[in-house]
Image (cartoon, grey):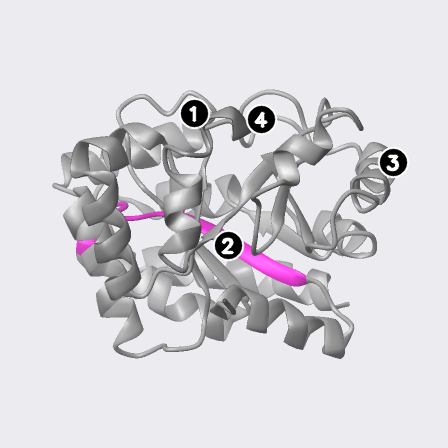
Amino acid sequence: MTTRIDVKFAALKKEGRAALVTFVTAGDPDYKTSLKIIEGLPKAGADVIEFGMPFTDPMADGPAIQAAGLRALKSGQTMKKTLKLVTDFRKKDKETPVVLMGYYNPIYVYGVEKFLEDAKKAGVDGLIVVDLPPEEDDELCIPALKAGLNFIRLATPTTDDKRAPAVFRNTSGFVYYVSVLGITGTKAPDLKNVKANVKRLKTHTLLPICVGFGVKSADQAKAIAKDADGVVVGSALVNAVAASLNKQGKATAKTAGAVHRLVKDIARGVSA
């Protein structure tokens, strides 16, 4: 099974550069604006796009992504609409890998089999489900792999050499290395630690390792891209959405452009 994710990372390896993986919350601040943001990401320099699946209790996420999820839910975003967003994105873009990121509860409520079938049909390439450990692989990971979707696992600074084989056993696509302990977007990554841990984890897997949590600038992205196969940017983009909204929390003419400008800037850092 070769997915768009595998194809993309193989192509970037030939180019000799790291991937820029961008995260935005599906439906934030509303469906139409969200689609406009997502459609413009590849042109701005995104190599892989993560769509956050809005959820009422996002325990691994910091204030920025929590607020984005609530804005999306308030504007009527559902799992069905998140899959429709992928379908609509695929009308214009057949190449860019799409990953759905979030929590198991909304998938469980939707129904695992139905979700995997609909996600595949919509054009999803991979899943990151942060609250399903390897011990629960039969729940979603194995069925996802059978359905032809990559199941991307998180590794953290506490994923030691003893734990790593279990974490990577059924992982595919890439590994998402969480560079800081705690919630998203609240601390800056320690570059020395990132370098050492990426090097160590590479002894356990041949998969590309992408580093995220706390990356906000082109300089940080450039430094991380020297050692990692990809850089993930999320909270900074979600903050750009929030900063562009009017007093009522609605999208303005500046919203999509604010996100695309930041992605362009960070993309320059990644490919430098």
The residue stretch that appears in magenta: 19-31
The label number, if any, that marks residue 186 in the structure image: 4
Quadrant in which the C terminus appears = bottom right
Amino acid type, mark 4: Thr
Between 63 and 15, the residue placed more toward the observer is 15
Residue picked out by circle 2:
22
**Residue corresponding to mark 1:** 63
Secondary structure, mark 3, is helix
- Kindly identify the amino acid type of the residue bearing the numbered disc 2: Thr
Q: Nearer the viewer, mark 3 or mark 1?
A: 3
Element marked by disc 1: helix
For the question of whether residue 175 can be seen, the reply is yes
Q: Going 23% across and 66% down the picture, which residue do you hit?
A: 87
Q: Nearer the viewer, residue 82 or 70?
A: 82
Q: Nearer the viewer, mark 1 or mark 2?
A: 2
Label 2 SS: strand
- On the image, the x and y values in percent for residue 263 come to 54, 60
Cα–Cα span, label 1 and label 2: 18 Å
Mark 3 or mark 1: whose residue is earlier in sequence: 1
| Residues at marks 3 and 4 touching, judged by CB atoms closer than 8 Å | no
Residue position marked by numbered label 3 in the rendering: 192
What residue sits 79% from the left and 32% below the top?
190
The vertical placement of 108 against 150, above or below, is: above
